[in-house]
Amino acid sequence: MVRLVPMSESEHQHLFSIVDETTEEKVGMIWFAVPIGRPHPSAFVYDFSIVEEQRRKGYGEQALRAVEDKVRELGLDTISLHVFGHNHAARALYEKAGNAVTDLMMSKKLVE
């Protein structure tokens, strides 16, 4: 299991180290914020990473569940994030965690 250790927290910005509870090793980080001035306040994940050597061990899923708990503690009911289309591993993780695609942007490169 992991726990989120605050690196920096303010009313609207929340930055955590992701720490393995057994080994006390830092295995990643996650940063989410509560953007101000939205009609329905929600959390937005701005950055999330697991140390490369620690990927595919379940830390990502555990960290996302821990963030859900933090967001609920803030009285919010929605978490959003952005993921690049080519990042298949991250997309699979987010989908497995229950995230749904809400927007899709496509582009075509015209210059060789």
Image (tube, grey):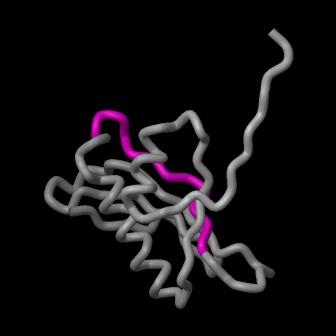
Q: Which residue lies furthest to the bottom in this view?
A: 75
Horizontally, residue 81 falls left or right of residue 16, namely right
Residue lying farthest to the right in this orientation: 111
Position of 57 with respect to 108 (left or right) is left
Viewer-side residue, 65 vs 27:
65
Residue 63 sits inside the magenta stretch: no
Predominant SS of the magenta segment: strand
Q: x, y percentage for residue 67? A: 43, 70
Q: Quadrant of the C terminus?
A: top right
- x, y percentage for residue 84? 60, 41
Residue under the point 55% across and 85% down: 76
Q: Nearer the viewer, residue 7 or 13?
A: 13
Left or right, 6 with respect to 19, comes to right
> Where 28 falls versus 108 (above or below)?
below
**Which quarter of the rendering shows the N terminus?**
bottom left
Give the magenta-colored segment's residue range.
43-54
Query: What residue do we see at 26% from left, 62% from top?
Result: 2
The picture places residue 20, in percent across and down from the top left corner, at 24, 56
Residue displayed at 35% across by 53% down: 60
Residue 50 falls in which quadrant of the image? top left
Front residue of 94/7: it is 94
* Number of callouts: 0
Instruction: Decide whether residue 52 is among the magenta residues.
Output: yes
Rendered residue at 63%/81% (across/down): 11
Tell which residue pokes out farthest to the top in this image: 112
